[in-house]
Amino acid sequence: MPRFTLREVLLSITIIAVGLGLLNASVQVNDLARSILALCAFATIGAGLFTPFHKKRLGAVLGLVLPLAFFLIMNLVGIRV
């Protein structure tokens, strides 16, 4: 069973909050900047989720790969998101 210190949990919450702030900021800009900010936001949120497990890089990679795969599959199927 994993055990987290208070510092790790607070750091994780802070990183996730920064990612959500980036995601909120991406709504207010044009298409290219929105895409870039959204990808950065997903990577930041993923890193925050995996911070207590000491796997920040894995979280960042999953935060980039999973949304890209989702949008690629949706576009191949023909569903507009």
Image (cartoon, rainbow, N blue to C red):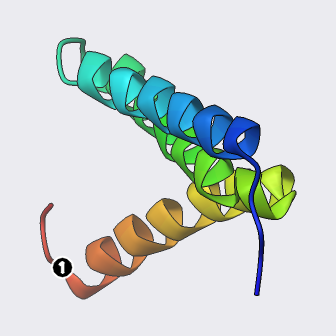
**In the image shown, does 54 or 4 lie closer to the viewer?**
4
Decide if residue 9 is in sight here.
yes
Tell me the quadrant of the picture where the N terminus can be found: bottom right
Vertical comparison of 62 with 20: above or below: below
Vertical comparison of 54 with 1: above or below: above
**In the image shown, does 61 or 12 lie closer to the viewer?**
12
Q: Amino acid at mark 1?
A: Gly
Residue 16 in the figure: left or right of residue 50: left
For label 1, count other residues whose C-alpha is less than 10 Å away and answer few (under 14), some (14-19) or many (20+): few
Which residue is pictured at 40% across the width and 18% down the height?
33
The quadrant in which residue 50 appears is: bottom right
Which residue is pictured at 48% across the width and 35% down the height?
41
Residue position marked by numbered label 1 in the rendering: 78
The quadrant in which residue 77 appears is: bottom left
The quadrant in which residue 49 appears is: bottom right
Which residue in the rendered view is the most extreme toward the left?
A: 80
**In the image shown, does 80 or 5 lie closer to the viewer?**
5
Position in image of residue 66 (x %, y %): 53, 69
Residue 60 in the figure: left or right of residue 25: right
Position in image of residue 28 (x %, y %): 17, 13
Vertical comparison of 65 with 34: above or below: below
Position in image of residue 25 (x %, y %): 29, 16
Decide if residue 40 is in sight here.
no
Vertical comparison of 32 with 8: above or below: above
